[in-house]
Amino acid sequence: MAIRRGFMGLPIASIILIGIVFLGSVPQATAETLTFKCLPMERRQKWFPSPMLRARYRRIRERGITVFDNGEWVWTKGASCTI
């Protein structure tokens, strides 16, 4: 006995419709405000020539610990460039 194509389309369409309804009803995440304190432990600076700008720029790398007001902490790394 052959399965009709129209018979299989209805269950597939209903599964897709139910999935869209459930995915659309997920509440949005709320923003949380945390205060923190950065404790730098190491800072490295290097000067590099920049032929396009005809100047030198400074690259700064920092490592340290960031402590949040709820007691959590994290190791941090950062880099920035200045002319």
Image: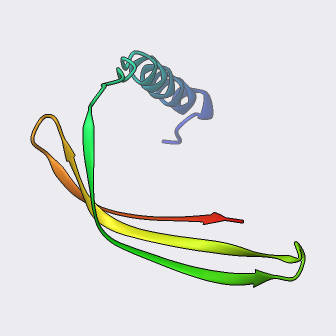
* Residue 8 x/y as whole percent: 52, 32
Quarter of the image holding residue 43? bottom left
| Residue sitting at x 87%, y 82% | 51
Task: Report the front residue among 79 and 7.
Answer: 79
| Residue sitting at x 25%, y 44% | 37
* Residue 63 x/y as whole percent: 34, 68
Q: Where 5 falls versus 54 (above or below)?
A: above
The furthest residue to the left: 71
- From the image, which quarter does the C terminus lie in? bottom right
Task: Report the front residue among 55 and 29.
Answer: 55
Task: Report the front residue among 43 and 67.
Answer: 43
* Residue 81 x/y as whole percent: 63, 66
Quarter of the image holding residue 33? top left
Task: Report the front residue among 38 and 72.
Answer: 38
Rendered image coloring scheme: rainbow
| Residue sitting at x 35%, y 20% | 30
Q: How many marks?
A: 0
| Residue sitting at x 63%, y 73% | 58
Q: Where 42 falls versus 64 (above or below)?
A: below
* Residue 22 x/y as whole percent: 38, 20
Q: Where 46 falls versus 63 (above or below)?
A: below
Quarter of the image holding residue 18? top left
